[in-house]
Image: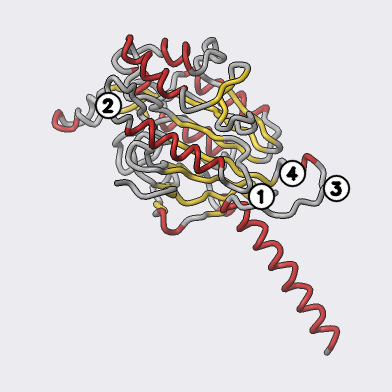
Amino acid sequence: MVKNMMRKTLVALVATMFISTNTALLLGVETHIDQNIKTSELTNNFYFIQLTDTHVMNKMFDRNEVDKNRLQTVLTHITYFTRKPAFVVVTGDLVEWGSGLGGALNYRAFKECFYEKDDQLYVDPDYTIPVYTTPGNHDYFWSRTLLNYHRFVDHNHIKENDRYTVTFGDTTLFFLDSGHNEINYEAKPMDWIYALGSGLSVRDLEWLDESLNSCTSRHKIVLMHHPAVNWGRYDVISHNRQSFISICEGYNVDLVLAGHTHAARVFESNGAFYPNDVLPLNCSLYPTLYVQTDAIKEGYYYRNITISGNDVWLGACEQCCETN
């Protein structure tokens, strides 16, 4: 009898410790870390933050700097987390438009929200939280080039057409450019206003297939601006959408993180939908999930993605404060 009680108590204690640790990771709060834990184990228990659609404009075009201030508010909020994120990703539409002199001024305003060291952007002045980006359709506006994006934000991946990977512990992130606006001429003329992302080239698909095939990380996450799965065919990528989905499913990609829609949605490739209020989700229990995160332009939105050992937890889209 006593042995059974002791055994039950021990099981309950272990379960409580497990739940507390994972909850802390999801919420970004501090937990005690044994200094004897190996670095490789620490890097497999971390979280990062997705931001998207910041749509920053220079003060010349946005007198009150509303979008810039929203971005700065979210970034400041992140720096106050007791347990800091490993890094931050921004999935496109960094500025309201990116081409020409006006676009250059917009990118200057965007960069003023961050710290920079050795061609790398950071959230904090101590350079401990790096920022990784991918372009969106507004970063092309009003042309089909990313000249200013490469000039001001990321000139390290020009030759690769903005394809690159970042590996942290046993997790690899694959960044892709989902392209500029393209009219869906297959739709009814009244629906031409719903422009698609031009999508992915054959070389993009080859690179993704080769990179996933050679990847030895347990967890794989793909990031681009436009979603591959949405309600119907609205706001998705135009070229090679199904091939992209097949590659992601074939390599058991955990998540495809996107923005663009200014909404918080999660889908499976078959259209199964998970509303924001059912999250967090343990992605290890699901096929590849296609995620849309709400825009900073619409509020103070961000999303936590937590890596906890063998599991990837997708957090709900949250606001750090209410919009006026």
| In the foreground, 4 or 198 | 4
State how far apart marks 4 and 2 are (Cα). Answer: 44 Å
State how far apart marks 2 and 3 are (Cα). Answer: 52 Å
Q: Which amino acid type corresponds to the residue marked 4 in the rendered image?
A: Leu
Q: Which amino acid type corresponds to the residue marked 3 in the rendered image?
A: Asn
Task: Say above or below: 194 vs 308.
Answer: above
Residues under numbered marks 4 and 3 in contact, where contact means CB atoms less than 8 Å apart: no
Q: Earlier in the sequence, mark 4 or mark 3?
A: 3
Residues under numbered marks 2 and 1 in contact, where contact means CB atoms less than 8 Å apart: no
The residue singled out by tag 4 in the image is 42
Q: Residues within 10 Å of mark 4 (few under 14, many from 20)?
A: some
The residue singled out by tag 1 in the image is 308
Q: Earlier in the sequence, mark 1 or mark 3?
A: 3
State how far apart marks 4 and 3 are (Cα). Answer: 10 Å
Q: Quarter of the image containing the N terminus?
A: bottom right
Coordinates of residue 243 in the picture (x, y in percent): 46, 30
